[in-house]
Amino acid sequence: MVTPFRLVETSPGNFSLLLSEFSPASEVFAAAGLEGGGYTWGAIARHLIDAEDDERLGLDPEGSMFCAYGEDRAALEQLGARLAALFHDRAALGKLIEEIGPENFDD
């Protein structure tokens, strides 16, 4: 399950993983001095994407929206599930933010 992220087929064979409502997870980012918008989730996704997925997935976040895209629906579903788990687990999200380091986020 990827909720609150949404996986949509934007055109035949092309998919996007989207998030535009950042609360309540944004509170975890705020505690670390980060905005918690699309760019912040983009940094989280970059950290989670392995080398194989890096070739299959693209990221195009905006301040008000997170977006990952590609033709590999399964890879986007897997990324969405990992991101959704973090969204719903504030302790794990906070730990990952510390691991990445707030200086490595684009706000």
Image: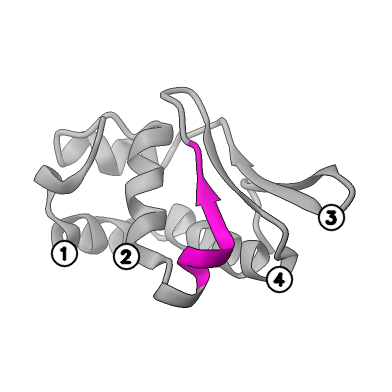
Left or right: where does residue 81 sit relative to residue 36? right
Q: Look at the numbered discs 4 and 1 and tell me whether their residues touch, using CB distance below 8 Å.
A: no
Q: Residue at x 39, y 31 (%)?
A: 37
Q: Look at the numbered discs 3 and 2 and tell me whether their residues touch, using CB distance below 8 Å.
A: no
Please rate how many residues cluster around mark 4, counting C-alpha atoms within 10 Å: few if below 14, some from 14 to 19, many from 20: few
Task: Identify the amino acid type marked 1.
Answer: Glu
Residue that numbered label 2 is attached to: 92
Closer to the eye: label 4 or 1: 4
Residue that numbered label 4 is attached to: 74
Left or right: where does residue 101 sit relative to residue 27? left
Nearer to me, 30 or 63: 63
Closer to the eye: label 1 or 2: 1
For mark 4, give the secondary structure.
Answer: helix
Left or right: where does residue 19 sit relative to residue 41? right
Task: Identify the amino acid type marked 2.
Answer: Ala
Distance CA(mark 2)–CA(mark 4): 23 Å
Q: Which mark is residue 13?
A: 3
Q: Return the disc, 3 or 1, that comes first in the chain's sequence.
A: 3
Q: Which mark is residue 99?
A: 1
Nearer to me, 58 or 28: 58
- Segment tinted magenta in the rendering: 53-60
Dividing the picture into quadrants, the one containing residue 28 is: top left
Distance CA(mark 4)–CA(mark 1): 26 Å
Please rate how many residues cluster around mark 2, counting C-alpha atoms within 10 Å: few if below 14, some from 14 to 19, many from 20: some
